[in-house]
Amino acid sequence: MRVVIAEDLYLLRDGLVHLLQAHDFEVVAAVESGPELLGALTGLRPDVAVVDVRLPPTFTDEGLQAALAARRAVPGLPVLVLSQHVEQLYARELLADGSGAIGYLLKDRVFNAEQFVDAVRRVAAGGTAMDPEVIAKLLASTARHQPLGALTPREREVLELMAEGRSNAAISQRLFLSESAVGKHTASIFSKLDLAPSDDDNRRVLAVLTYLNAARG
């Protein structure tokens, strides 16, 4: 699996390279600025990109904007964004096109190699990998938002884990439910969010997008 890494701190960038190489990823580029990142993503078209939000030259959201520009040029390009802090706006921007293959993790997650590598693989496969702290913050800010307000507490738990990128099997293990029960909760979520029957993975992405967009309310 071919990966592009964008991180301006040398030690972290080098650490990411060695971590991913140790798990059989091929790092095709490791860059340190927004312009370099955009060139690498559009030129090399990797299987997944791991991108720091704040990169030179502006040190604001240069990495995020370069990743979004690359996804406009290469629709569906998988991108896992790393950030020092929870920024709800970044999560919403990443998911705005509803196509999936997106992740948002706090940098602290990199130190859990298994969790981080799993997130990279899920994003590369077209799924989502949202940091639990991002989800928790959004939950707190959307408690009374409709249509999320129509969900039961259990359905909200299921949607929260969906937003993290968990499969039905993983959700069933986390919540000590049968897979059939999780499937029923998922179907109910789709119905309450008015998501018409279609490809299941696409509806999961749309459900997560609705969940994140609710933070605007």
Image (cartoon, helix red, strand yellow):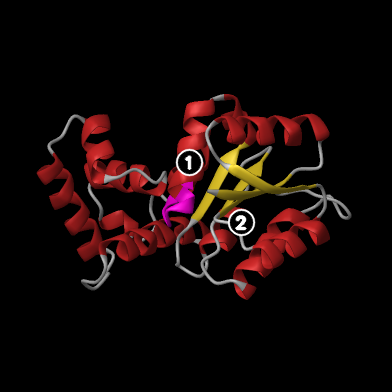
Kindly identify the residue that appears in the image at 56 percent across and 47 percent down.
104
Residue at numbered disc 1 = 119
Q: Which callout, 1 or 2, points at the residue further toward the start of the chain?
A: 2
Q: Secondary structure at mark 1?
A: helix
Which region is colored magenta? 123-131
Residue in view at x 62 percent, y 63 percent: 45
Image location (x, y in percent) of residue 188: 18, 57
Left/right of residue 138 with respect to residue 182 in the rendered view = right
Q: Position of residue 124 (x, y in %)?
A: 48, 52
Q: Is residue 130 magenta?
A: yes
Residue wearing tag 2: 89
Q: Nearer the viewer, residue 144 or 26?
A: 26
Tag 2's secondary structure? helix
Residue at 87% over, 55% down: 58
Q: Nearer the viewer, residue 1 or 16?
A: 1
Can I make out residue 52 in this image? no
